[in-house]
Amino acid sequence: MSTSDEIKAVEDRIDKRREILAHRYDDVKRELSTVAGKAVRGFLARPKDAKKGGPGIIVIHEWWGLNDNVRDQARQLASHGYTALGVDLYGGGVASDPDQAQALMKQVMADPAQAQENLKQAYDYLHDKQGAGKIGVIGWCFGGGWSLGTTLLMPDKIDATVIYYGHLETDKAKLAPLKMPVLGFFGGQDQSIPVSSVREFEKALKDLGKSVEIHVYDDASHAFANPSGGSYNAKDAEDAWKRTTAFFKKNLK
């Protein structure tokens, strides 16, 4: 990243912080029930004027874990009027380097049933405890794959799905139950999520008559929307976020 890009990234983070602070919201921790004997925790950001029946969003972290960046994403969504619940699929673990992140991710993928139960509880918490009406899901990287996974897990409950450069399912039989609109963002230079697989996913959904909108940013790499990472692309990240908020507004409010 060049010096000018680094400066732009800092300015962008400041602008986002101003956007957040311009709205009123509550930050609360969430703890409910257990999965495999361990407490299920998360981070909840909600508008102070949140009303029963208002929209909610499940927010799923990258492979780094539920860190400050993901909390800021939840706060941003709260500033737009959503009760946003950041789930923690790592049981409190947060990685500081790729090796740690990979180890944490492997633990989840070795027993996906625990993550699925966590996500089901996240939905129930938003719907039953917070009184949310329509509920969407969003995730980045590892969380992008789980955003789709949550949708496949609860196709009759999720009302809108946003995927940022997550691994995809292209089997039409598995995608057939989906009823909600899907929005996806990917990088043309992403070596871990080939554009060919993105287009295959898009075609499968369109062949099934599903509502899908895919954006591939030609010059962007994996994790282009993470302002704390070296692949951050401010221009594409800003465009993706505008489309994300417009998509949720259309489908959840």
Image: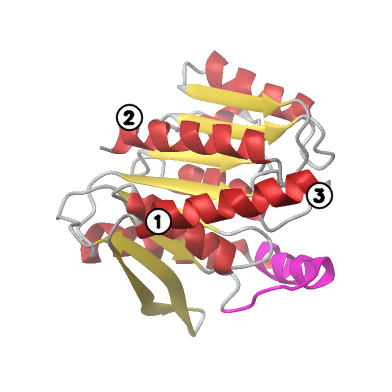
Q: Could you tell me residue 246's position as x and y percent?
A: 40, 32
Q: Could you tell me residue 230's position as x and y percent?
A: 79, 53
The tag earlier along the polypeptide, 2 or 1, is 1
State the residue lying farthest toward the left: 52
Q: Is residue 174 visible?
A: no
Residue in the picture at 51% in, 39% down: 241
Amino acid of disc 2? Lys
Query: Label 2: few (<14), some or many (≥20) within 10 Å?
Result: few
Of the pair 76 and 56, the residue shown nearer to us = 76
Q: Which mark is residue 242?
A: none
Disc tally is 3
Residue in the picture at 27% in, 47% down: 55
Q: Which residue is mark 2?
A: 250
Amino acid of disc 1? Ile
Is 29 placed above or below 219 here?
A: below
The tag earlier along the polypeptide, 3 or 1, is 3
Q: Which residue is mark 1?
A: 20
SS at circle 1: helix
* Magenta residues, start to end: 92-109
SS at circle 2: helix
